Amino acid sequence: MKDKASEPFTQELDEMRQRITALETVNAIYKQSKQLLQTLNQASVAMIQALTPEEIFTAVSEELTRINLTCVVLLTDEKQESLSPKYFNYPTKIIRTAEKLTGLRIEAFSTLIEATDAFKQVVWDKKTIFIEDSKDTLQNILLKPSWQFVNEVVKLLNIPKAINAPLLIEDEVFGIFSVQGANLSEADVPTITTFAHQMAAAWHKSQLFEQINQDIAKRKKTEETLHQRHTQLQTAAEVSHAASSILVIDKLINQSVTLICERFNLYYVGLFLIDKKQKYAVLRAGTGESGSKMIAQEHRLRVGGTSMIGQCVAQSEARIALDVGEEAVRFDNPLLPLTRSELALPMRSRGQTIGALTVQSTEMAAFDTTHISVMQTMADQIAIAIDNANLYAEVQQELAERELAEEKLRKSEENLRITLNSIGDAVIATDTKGRVVRMNPAAEQLTGWTFDEAQGKPLIDVFHIINAKTRKLAENPAAKVMKTGEIVTLANHTTLIAKDGTEHQIADSGAPIQDADDNTSGVVLVFRDVSAEYQMREALRESEERFRSIYENATVGIYRTTPEGKILMANPALVKMIGYSSFEELKKRNLDEQWYDPNYPREEFKRLIEKEGKLIGFSSIWKKSDGTNIIVSESAKALKDADGNILYYEGIAVDITKQKHAERELARAKNYIDNIINSMPSVLIGVDAEGNVTQWNHQAEQVTGLKIKDALGQKLGEVFPRLSLEMEHIKTTMRKREVQENAKIPHRMAGETRYEDVTIYPLLTNGVEGVVIRIDDVTEQVRLEEMMIQSEKMLSIGGLAAGMAHEINNPLAGMMQNAEVLRNRLTGDIPANHRAAEAVGTDIATIRAYLEARKLGVMLDNIRLSGSRAAKIVQNMLSFARKSESKFAPHALDDLLDRTVELAHTDYNLKKNYDFQQIRIVREYEEDLPKVPCEETKIQQVFLNIIKNGAEEMVKGTHGNAPPQFTLRTYKEETMACVEIIDNGPGMSEAVRKRVFEPFFTTKPVDQGTGLGLSVSYFIIVEHHGGEMSVESSLKRGTKFIIKLPFAIREQI
Amino acid sequence: MKTIRVLVLDDDKTVRESLTAYLEDMGYEAWAMVDAESALAHLARVPADAAIVDIRLPGMNGEEFIRAAHEHWPQMVFLVYTGSPTFQSPTDIRGFKRVSKQIFVKPLSDMNLLHLEIQQMVKKR
C-alpha cells in the first residue's frame, strides 16, 4: 500500500532499484564483453594457423557459436557497389527454411550497399556500427513480398542485434564482418572492430600465400609447356619430312595422323579430305580402332554442317573446342567418347581447302594458341604434300592417257578412211578455210574430181551446186556451217554439176568437225545422188497430197482403229461427225468404253469383220460428244500382218441418221396408208400401165380368195376375171386422166345376183402410170333402193288405188253380180225361171242339165272368182295408201294375237286345205307388257297374214314331223314391244327369206295369193307404225317372224 | 207374207240392173233409181221397206239420202253397198238402228249376204 508520506521513499527505492538494474545490466554487459573478448582472443589464435579464408572463417565461427553468436562475412564486388554473403555459419536446415520463406538463395544473394544504411556506413565510411534491431536491415535486404516474414527470419536466424565491422586490406574495404546475436551491445563495438582488423590481416596473409602458390604453379606449367612445344616442333618437322617424301597419299596421310597422335599424346587424330563435289569431308585417315572403324563405315561430315570439321572446312578456319560439352557446333562421335577438347584445322593448299584435320584430347582445354599454330602449319604442309602427290599422280595418268589417246586416234583414223571409202555416200571434208582436205571415192565420182586434184582447192570449185528449180548458184554449205557452227541440210532441190558438166540431183548435209576443245576445225559434207529418189519422192509427195486432200476433205468419216478400240487416225469429217473439235480430243475416247451405245454390237462388228476380213454397210448407233445418238453406216476392212493377226481396222463411216429417220417415217407412212387401205371395206386394187397388179388390199383378198403375194405382179384379168371387162375403162382412165365410174354392175355369185360399183381412179402424181380400181359391193343398197322404190311405187299406187278403188269396184260388182244372177236364173229354183222355161218349151231341169254338160256353171263361178280376186287386189292396194288420220289406240299385243288366232279359227276358205283346229298354239307372253299405240285392225291383219302363211306352210310338213305348232311370244325391249310368231314348218331358203317382204314376191302358184300379203304387213308395221319387221328362217327349221312396235308413236313422213 | 219392197240406189248401170234382177229372183219387189233426188221423189209416191244405197251418187250422196229418207219414212231400213272399201258411216248414221251396221263393199261375191241382212233388219222392225 502506497501513501503520500512514503512517496519520497518509494521514489528513492525506485531509483535504487533502477540503479541496481543498470548496474546489473552493465555487469551483464561487462560479463558479456569479457566473454566476447575472450572468445575473440581465442579466435585470433586460431586464425594464425589458418592459411585460407575458409579456415579463417571456420575458426572464428566455431568460437562465436560457442557463445551463441552467429557471424557472416560479406564480400564486396570490385566496384564496391554490392555485397554478397560468402561465409556464414547458420545451420543448413535453418538456411533452407529461411530461403523458403524469403524466396532468396543465400549463395546467389547480393544486395546493393547503397540500399542499406547498415552497410553503407560500414563499407564507404569504414565505420563499425551497432544495429539495435536487425529487422530494418533485413527488410532493406529482402524483397518486398518477403517483408511479412522478416520477424520470423530474424527469429530463425537468431539475429536480433548485430554489429557490422569493415574488413580492410591496405586501407581498402573488401568486405563486412557481421556478428549477430541477442547478447550484443554498443560496448562490444570496439572489440569487434579490433577483431575485424585482425581478421582482415589474416585474410590478407592467406591471399598472399595463395598468390605465391599460384605463381609457383604457373612457373611449373610454363616449364611443361615449353617442353611440350619442343616435342611438337619436333613432330612437326618429322611430319613435314614424311609429307615431303611420300608421294602416295594414303601412306602420307596415315603416317601423318599416327605421328601427330603419338607425339602430342592425343586421344585421336583424324584426317578428312573433301570429295569431288565439295559436299562432304570424307574421313581418309584416323588413328586407332575408332579410326579404322570409321573409315570402314565411310564416315563423312557435310561441308558447312553442324560439326567442327564441317564448319572448319566451310569457313576455312580452325575451330577449337576447349570443352566439348559446351561447344554448340560439334558432332558427338560415339566412337570417341572420351574426347573433352577438340581442334579442327583446315588443310589448305594453293588457296584451296582440300580437307581438315581433327585433333582430339581427353583433357579439357588441352590446346592453346601455340598448339593451334603448330598444328595448323602441319595441317597445311600435309595439304601441300597431298596436293603434290595428286599432281604427280595426275601427270602420270595424263601421260598414260595421252599415249592411249594417240593410239586410239591412229586406229580411228584408219577406220574412218576405210569407212569413207566404202560408204555409198560421197564425203568431202574441208578445213576452216573451206579447202578440201579429204574426199572419198564416191565424192570423186559424183563431182568428177579426183582427191589429188581437189585437195587444197576451195570447196566451191569442186562442189558446184545450183538450185534445181531456179538454176541459180546455191549457197556454199561449208561456209554456212563454219558460220553457224551447226549442222546444215541443203535445200531439197539442189543440183550438183560435175567437172564434166553432168548434173545430179543431190541430197546432202554438212556438219562442223569439232576438236576436243569444241573448236571447229573444218566441215564435213555428206551427199548422194537422189535423182531417182528425188523423182520418186516428188511423185510420192504429189500422190500423198492428192490422197491427203481426199482424206481431209472427205465428207464421210475415215478412220483407223486398233482391234481394242484405240483410235489411231480419224479424218476431220469423222471428228466432226462425233461432235469433237479436234482429233486430240477424240483420241481420248476409247471405242470399247465410250464410243458406242451400250447396245452397240461391237462384238458383232468384230465377228463379221474377222470372218470376212471386211464388212459393208454395217449400221449401228454411235454416241456423240454431247451425248446424243446418231446412226452410222460403216464399211471397214481388217488389216493383218504377215502372220494373219489383225493390226487395225480401217473404214469409212457415214452419218445416216437423217436417212434412217426418213426411212422410218416412210415406213410408218407406208404402214399407215396400208392400214387405211386394208381397213377399207372396198376392194382396192392398184394396176400399172401394163395391167399388172401393184396393190392388193385385204378386201381384195377376201373377195377373190387370193393372197397379196399371189396377186402382186399378175395380170389383172387373171386375178380378177370379171375386171378384165374393165380393161377398156382402165385404159380410158389412164389416157384421159379422169375418174371412171360404173355403178351397179351385176354379176352372179353363189346363185344370186350381186351388184358392184366399180370406180377407176387414175394415179395422177409423180408421173406414175397406173390406176386404182375400187370395187364396192352395193347389192344391199340396190335391194334397199329397189325396196324403197317399190315402197314409193306402192305408196303412189296406194294413192291411186284410193282414188280408183271405187271406179274399179263398181264394174267388178256389176260383172260379178250379173254372173250370179245368171247362175240363179239358169239353175235356180225361182218361179220366174219356171215360167220363162215353160214359155220357151223347156224346163229348168233341162237347162240345168245343159249347163252341167257344158260346165257353164263353173265358168259363171269363175267369173265371180276372178272378180273377187281383182277386188282383193284393189283392196290390198289401198293398204299402201299413206297413213290417214291417226286411229291409234293403246292395245295389248297378246290380246291382239289371241283374237287373231280366233279369227284364224273361224276363217275358212273353200280352197283351203288345212284345219286350223289341229295346230297347237304355245303362248309365251311377257307379263305386264305395256300396251302399244297401234291401229287394231291393221295389226290384226298383219298377224293374220303371218299365221295363215304359217299354217299353209306347216301343211307341207313340219320339222322332224312333229305336230304343227305356233309359238306366240311377246317381250319387251327398251323402246319396243316385240312379238314373235314361230312355226315349225319347212322354213325358207335364204334366197327366199331375203325377198319375202318384196311386193308381188310369192312362192305360191300364180292363182294362189297375190304376193302382197307380207309386203303389206311390212308396210303397215314399218311405215304406219314406225316399227320393225324381220324374219328368220332356215330350211327344215321353221320360220320366225319378229315384229317390233314402239311404245311411243313417232311421226312418219 | 207381204212382199218386201227394196229400193236399189246406185249410179252404176250394171250393178243396178243385176242387183235388181237378183232381188226379184229372191222374191222381192225391187226397183232401181239412178240418183238420190229421183229416189226420194219416187219414195214419196211409192214407199219402200228397204234400200240398198250406194254412197257415191251424182247429186246428193248416199248418207244424205239416208238421212232424208229416214226422216220421212222412219220405218225404212238401209243397207250401204259401196265401192269405197274405206268408207265409214258418219257418226250420226252409225247410230241409226235402221241402218245396217255392216257396210257392204263392192264387189260382193255373194249377194245372198244382202238378202240375209234385209231379212234380218226387216224382221227387227
Image (cartoon, coloured by chain):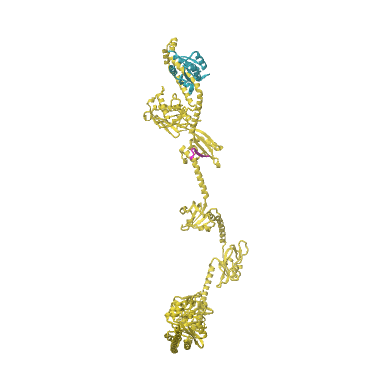
Chain colours: A yellow, B cyan
* Residue A55 appears in the figure: no
- Nearest the camera: A152 or A431? A152
Residue under the image location 50 percent in, 42 percent down: A673
- Nearest the camera: A102 or A788? A102
- Nearest the camera: A541 or A1029? A1029
Number of dots carrying numbers: 0
Compared with A492, B9 (above or below) is above
Instruction: Indicate whether residue A827 is drawn in magenta.
Output: no
Image location of residue A906, percent across then percent down: 40, 24
Residue under the image location 38 percent in, 25 percent down: A917
Image location of residue A600, percent across then percent down: 47, 53
| Residue A580 horizontal side relative to residue A1008, left or right | right
* Residue A100 appears in the figure: yes
Image location of residue A836, percent across then percent down: 45, 11
Q: Based on the displayed image, in which of its 4 quarters is residue A184 positioned? A: bottom left
The extreme front residue here reads A5
Residue under the image location 52 percent in, 33 percent down: A743
Q: Report the span colored magenta.
A: A679-689
- Nearest the camera: A679 or A314? A314
Compared with A723, A484 (above or below) is below
Instruction: Indicate whether residue A681 is drawn in magenta.
Output: yes
Image location of residue A129, percent across then percent down: 49, 85
Q: Quadrant of the N terminus of chain A?
A: bottom left
| Residue A908 horizontal side relative to residue A630, left or right | left
Compared with A326, A691 (above or below) is above
